[in-house]
Image: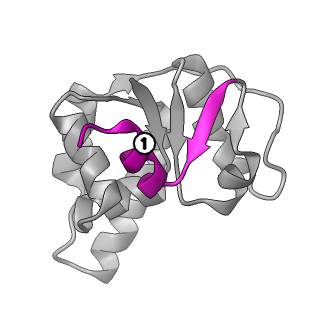
Amino acid sequence: MKIALDTNVFVSGVFFTGPPYQILSAWRNQEITLLVSPEIIVEYQRIGRELRSKFPGVDLRSFLELLSVHAEMIQPRPLPPVIHEDPSDDKFLECAVAGKAAFIVTGDKHLLRLGGFRGIKILKPREFVRDHLKK
């Protein structure tokens, strides 16, 4: 099963327990395929740098390296704008569409408001874990 993870879910999964952590664990155990695009990687890296500057012990680099080996890199084509309130969220839709994802997992209100996009379900982490991961 292919999924795209919004940045907030990825970062939460790295540093905290709970559903985002369970999703990253399922990915590391090859139960799901994580789709990323160059634009998503850049955002993950930017947030990692911001966190590291505020909290010196915080480091996303090992997870970002893991992404380069175990995630599926997608080269999406731009879509017409979808999320006008925050156009930077469109990169997750573009990646999911191009990679034929089943889900986008997010805590972002703009993405969640869509509920779905071109047959891709958009869910909160807790819903995804409850309904789609092995128990």
Q: Can you say whether 41 is above or below 125 in the image?
A: above
Of residue 37 and residue 46, the one placed in the foreground of this image is 37
Q: Amino acid at mark 1?
A: Asp
**Is residue 5 left or right of 48 when viewed as pictured?**
right
Tell whether position 132 is magenta: yes
Query: Which stretch appears magenta?
Result: 119-135
Question: Which residue is most to the bottom?
Answer: 54
The structure residue drawn at horizontal position 47% and vertical position 21%, both measured from the top left corner, is: 74
Identify the residue under disc 1. 131
The structure residue drawn at horizontal position 66% and vertical position 53%, both measured from the top left corner, is: 112
> Whole-percent x and y of residue 49?
35, 64
> Whole-percent x and y of residue 23?
31, 46
Colour scheme of the picture: one colour
Quarter of the image where the C terminus is located: top left
Quarter of the image where the N terminus is located: top left
> Whole-percent x and y of residue 120?
62, 29
Q: Can you say whether 4 is above or below 89 in the image?
A: above
The structure residue drawn at horizontal position 42% and vertical position 62%, both measured from the top left corner, is: 47
Write down the quadrant of residue 69 in the picture.
top left
Tell whether position 131 is magenta: yes
Q: Can you say whether 60 is above or below 32 in the image?
A: below
> Whole-percent x and y of residue 76?
59, 21
Total numbered labels placed on residues in the image: 1
Of residue 1 and residue 33, the one placed in the foreground of this image is 1
Q: Secondary structure at mark 1?
A: helix
The structure residue drawn at horizontal position 34% and vertical position 72%, both measured from the top left corner, is: 51
Write down the quadrant of residue 134 in the picture.
top left
Neighbour tally class for label 1: few under 14, some 14-19, many 20 plus, Cα within 10 Å = few
